[in-house]
Image (tube, rainbow, N blue to C red):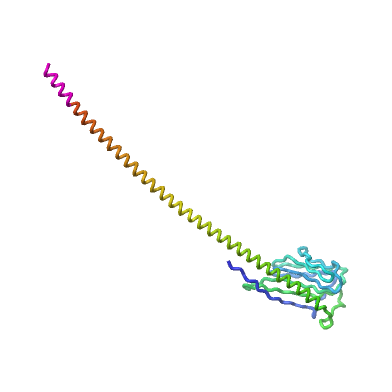
Amino acid sequence: MRYPAFAFSLFLFLSIANAIPIYAGSSIYRTFPNCLDLNITLLCSLPIEGEFLPSPNCRLVENQTYLNVWSCDCSNGYVSNLTIAPNAKNDCLIIYDYIQAIEVPERVVHRTTVYRYYTNATNITYLNQTIVNLTTSYEVLYRYYSNLSQKLMTKVQVLESEKQTYQNLVNYLKGLINRQNATMEELGQEIEKLAEERQELERRWLLSIAVLVFFLVLSSMVFLVKLKRKNQQIGKLLVAFRKRE
């Protein structure tokens, strides 16, 4: 059995220059086709106080003052719902980072989509007017991709382990089949041996019957000859006795 190699590319889509305004009290719905792994990262300018609520199947894996990261269980056609509380007052980057399986042999594409969240429309600015803490962003992304690399290595190890388990099963089944074939061959030899012994016993039985019949016939003939001689002797004695009278 052949396992596909995990080759992936990173595509970072930034929509800060053409910012998408997302306001307090709204929800962000996003569909992920052929999703294998999804992480949602929030990088905010103000402390995060629980104003962002992801889907129920997402768990918080990193909780810092200005940074939240959720890991979500996803599958093909997964729809993510990130709800923003009505009283939210913050300025954040919402990063959807996911691994998507595509119909290309031995290839998995890793895509990242970044949204710009604004508390109100007046805060919308262009990229050349926005000051971003690049150092913090780099550290966050570096940590995330380091964790992602570890996850991929873990998945590869799991696949290798499953491959070895499968190979062990194949070897076991082959051994079982060989043992069954050997058992059937031994059984066939034993049956042939029993058949030969049965034929030998039948030959011996027939020979014994023949010998017994021969001796019976011979004994009968001897008895008849002796009986005839006795009768002849008795006849002679009777003749002699009659002459004397």
Q: Quadrant of the N terminus?
A: bottom right
- Position of 140 compared to 202: left or right? right
Q: Nearer the viewer, residue 60 or 190?
A: 190
Question: Can you tell which quarter of the image residue 201 is in?
Answer: top left
User: In the image, is 206 to the left or to the right of 45?
Assistant: left
Q: Is residue 220 magenta?
A: no
Q: Quadrant of residue 32?
A: bottom right
Q: Position of residue 19 (x, y in %)?
A: 81, 78
Q: Is residue 180 above or below residue 113?
A: above
Toward the bottom, the furthest residue is: 128
- Name the spot of residue 20 as percent of width and height, x first: 80, 76
Is residue 160 toward the left or the right of residue 144 in the image?
left
Residue 142 falls in which quadrant of the image? Answer: bottom right
Magenta highlight on residue 235: yes
Region in magenta? 232-245
Q: Is residue 73 above or below residue 12?
A: above
Query: Which residue is at the far left?
Result: 243
Which quadrant of the figure contains the C terminus? top left
Tell me what residue is drawn at x 82 percent, y 81 percent: 126
Q: Is residue 238 above or below residue 134?
A: above
Residue 49: x %, y % from top left: 86, 67
Q: Is the stretch drawn in magenta largely helix, strand or loop?
A: helix
Q: Tally the numbered discs.
A: 0
Residue that lies at the very extreme toward the top in this rendered image: 245
Viewer-proximal residue among 218 and 69 = 218
Locate residue 96, reporting x and y percent: 76, 72
